[in-house]
Amino acid sequence: MPKEKICHVGVSFGHDSDLYSFPNGHPLNNKRTKLFASSLSELSSSTRNLSIIKPVACREKDLLLFHAQEYVDFVKASSSSGTGYLDYGDTPSFKGVYEASLFPVGSTLEGFEMIVEGKFDHFFNPVGGLHHARRDRAGGFCVFNDAAVVIEKAIKDLGLKRIAYVDIDAHHGDGVFYGFELDKRVIIGDIHEDGRYLYPGTGYFQETGKGDAIGTKLNLPLAPGSGDDEFMQAFDKVEAFIRNHEPEFIFLQCGADGLRDDPITHLQYSWKSHAYAAKKLHALAHEFCQGRLLAMGGGGYNPKNVEAAWIALAGELCS
């Protein structure tokens, strides 16, 4: 009998990953990934099917796949001055913020291209998943929306008709959801803390898409205090929803801020929720997408949680 296939996984991580880091004690800073980086190095040393890839910057024209030129120009100007905010108070500017923001997008696009070219079965960009940025503005610590950019690229370059985007960050992925709310080609399953209690205050069950896209989006808000059991029950619904649409490519935003003791959310997951989601989507990717699965990080502000959740995910993708 032939041996079971062991997946080859690429992970984008390196010095340039640290550049996307807000100053002055901001929750999203590069200290949150230090433990993960150490464990990732150990995982890479212990398995031959995980490769660490140097982060790369995207080009301005890549940003314009999703973002408006006027907004890109605004970030450039703010990057030069290094003062003020890029939104209404959550996303501060700093000198070089434009250049730093090119790496999350570029690394997600690099992972996509490597999967399409067959260099990797799966890919993970831990500093990606910046799902709050809208086409014309920043939001929720997110300057440019790498998830939305890569979805646009998948549509443009591959002509895909059924793209699955699954988001398990504690915060609703509003930038992606509303960016593609009218697009029936983008199938969205989003599990998050109820928007009545947490930023951005969106993502209600009744929101299922608009126009021709009605029924292609699934929002599953969870009550504060929900743990692994509630998450897994919700994820089974997401799995069935995605399966029903027979996706051609799967993107996963796997923010780790839903784990217990995150300082800015109220959910109570353990790393087992991330392992569960990765295992389920891994199987779906091989069933429907020739294995094409790209994961992006997102939130997570307790370094121990970030390490535990993302190492669990990487391990599942390697299996």
Image (cartoon, rainbow, N blue to C red):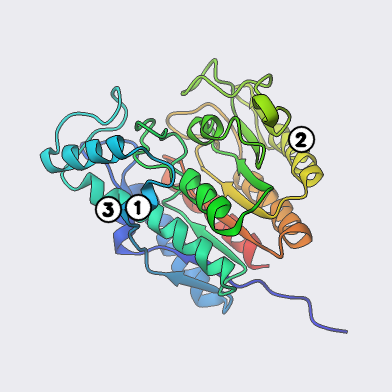
Residue 162: percent from left, percent from top? 69, 47
**Residue ID at (62%, 68%):** 121
Give the foreground label among 2 and 3: 3
- Name the kind of residue labelled 3 in the image: Leu
253, above or below 294, in the image:
above
User: Where 90 sits versus 27, above or below?
Assistant: above
Secondary structure at numbered mark 1 = helix
Q: Is residue 208 visible?
A: no
Q: Name the residue that disc number 3 marks.
A: 19
Return the disc, 2 or 3, that comes first in the chain's sequence.
Answer: 3
Q: Is residue 19 visible?
A: yes
- Quadrant containing the N terminus is bottom right
For the residues bearing labels 1 and 3, Cβ distance under 8 angstroms: no
- Residue 61 is marked as 1
Q: Residue at x 37, y 68 (%)?
A: 54
Judged left or right of residue 164, residue 263 is left
| Three-letter amino acid code at the position of disc 2 | Gln
Q: Dot 2: what SS?
A: helix
**Mark 1 vs mark 2, CA separation in Å:** 41 Å
In this rendering, the answer to whether 80 lies above or below 296 is: above
First in residue order: circle 1 vs circle 2:
1
Residue at the limit of the structure toward the top, as seen here: 196
The amino acid type found where label 1 is placed reads Lys
On the image, the x and y values in percent for residue 247 come to: 72, 50
Q: Which residue is mark 2?
A: 233
